[in-house]
Amino acid sequence: MAYDYLTWIALKRPLTEKEKSRRIDVHKPVATDAADAHTVFSMNDTVLEVCDGAYFQQGWALFAFLIGFPLLLFFAVSTALTSIDVPAAITRNGDQFWFSVTGWIEAAIAFAGCAVTAFFLRQDCFNYRHKSVRFNRKTRMVYAFRHNGSGGVIQVPWDSAFFYPHRKASNKMLGGAPTIMRCLVLDEADRVINTFSFGARVVNSDTEDTDYGRQVLYQVQANFEFIRRYMESGPASIPSIQHYLPKGPSLRASLSAWFFGVNDIGRLGHSARLFTFVLSGPLFVMAILHYIAQLTSREPVWPPEVETACGNAQPTVATVT
């Protein structure tokens, strides 16, 4: 199994029929528009570097830890103490043993929940500030960063990579079905041996056979079309990038990551402006958590051979918001 920020992907298996039906041909347009979708770290004539699928989710795992860990810990400790100090009335009735066992089981489950929230915390904090993906149009290779050191980069040829829009299961708590572009790395027998996600991430509250559902999916397709045109025809074939993502921690950048697109919603009318005003509070909190996650994490270091192949990935000069 491969773990890709709160998503488990099965490996060492053949492709599913659904995956096959959603595969994108990198030599054919997937959308009429091409949008960078505020996902680009840097770009030059050789390399386009974009964020992975987790960049805009940073903060959620920290939020889950800050809420879940203290509550579960309090419940676990209080339940354990209660199980030790069994009331006298229960002792007289001969139920002390079962009361104590039940309490310790509940405490153990709560302690296990604390461990789970700590695991989630590691997805945001004390990790990497970003795990970006590089598209090298000179070598026709795609490099996906996973960790520093040996074996920390997934490499796959652009022309044979298996790209498809990965629609996860719908979740009402998340507002629908998260959808993101995913790459499956295949072996000679077309079995999945590795995977990574990148670029724009959307949440689709409808099925993809409706007008709204197709419009939401189109955002992911247009973002991939931006990358595809870069790889096939170069920087001159894509719209200019107004704002690049920063590679270091910045509160301004974290605010930009969470508030990206909110101003566009506010222009739709008075009701929309009221909605964005109400939404701004939670978004500000998540931006702060995103910033904390960035501060506590370390900078990714690409292997020398990848840096050499990418010409040291010197970016074009751009403005960050």
Image: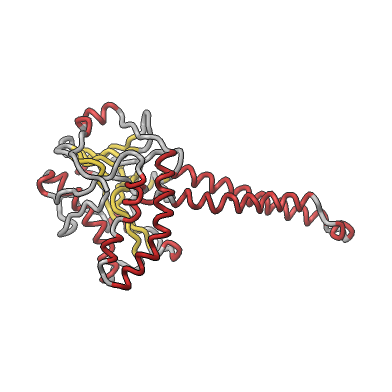
Q: Is residue 8 visible?
A: no
Q: Foreground: 203 or 30?
A: 203
Q: Is residue 99 left or right of residue 233?
A: right
Q: Quadrant of residue 269?
A: bottom left
Q: Which residue is painted at 60% across and 48% down in the image?
A: 112
Q: Foreground: 125 or 161?
A: 125
Q: Is residue 101 left or right of residue 32?
A: right
**272, above or below 292, in the image:** below
Q: Position of residue 217 (x, y in %)?
A: 27, 61
Number of callouts = 0
Q: Is residue 153 left or right of residue 61?
A: left
Q: Quadrant of residue 102?
A: bottom right
Q: Which residue is painted at 29% across and 53% down in the image?
A: 200
Q: Foreground: 261 or 60?
A: 261
Q: Position of residue 144 (x, y in %)?
A: 30, 40
Q: Which residue is painted at 71% across and 53% down in the image?
A: 79
Q: Is residue 268 visible?
A: yes
Q: Coloured how?
A: secondary structure
Q: Foreground: 301 or 320?
A: 320
Residue placed furthest toward the right = 92
Q: Which residue is painted at 22% across and 30% down in the image?
A: 312
Q: Position of residue 320 (x, y in %)?
A: 25, 45
Location of the N terminus by quadrant is: top left
Q: Position of residue 85 (x, y in %)?
A: 80, 51
Q: Is residue 210 left or right of residue 47?
A: right
**170, above or below 246, in the image:** below
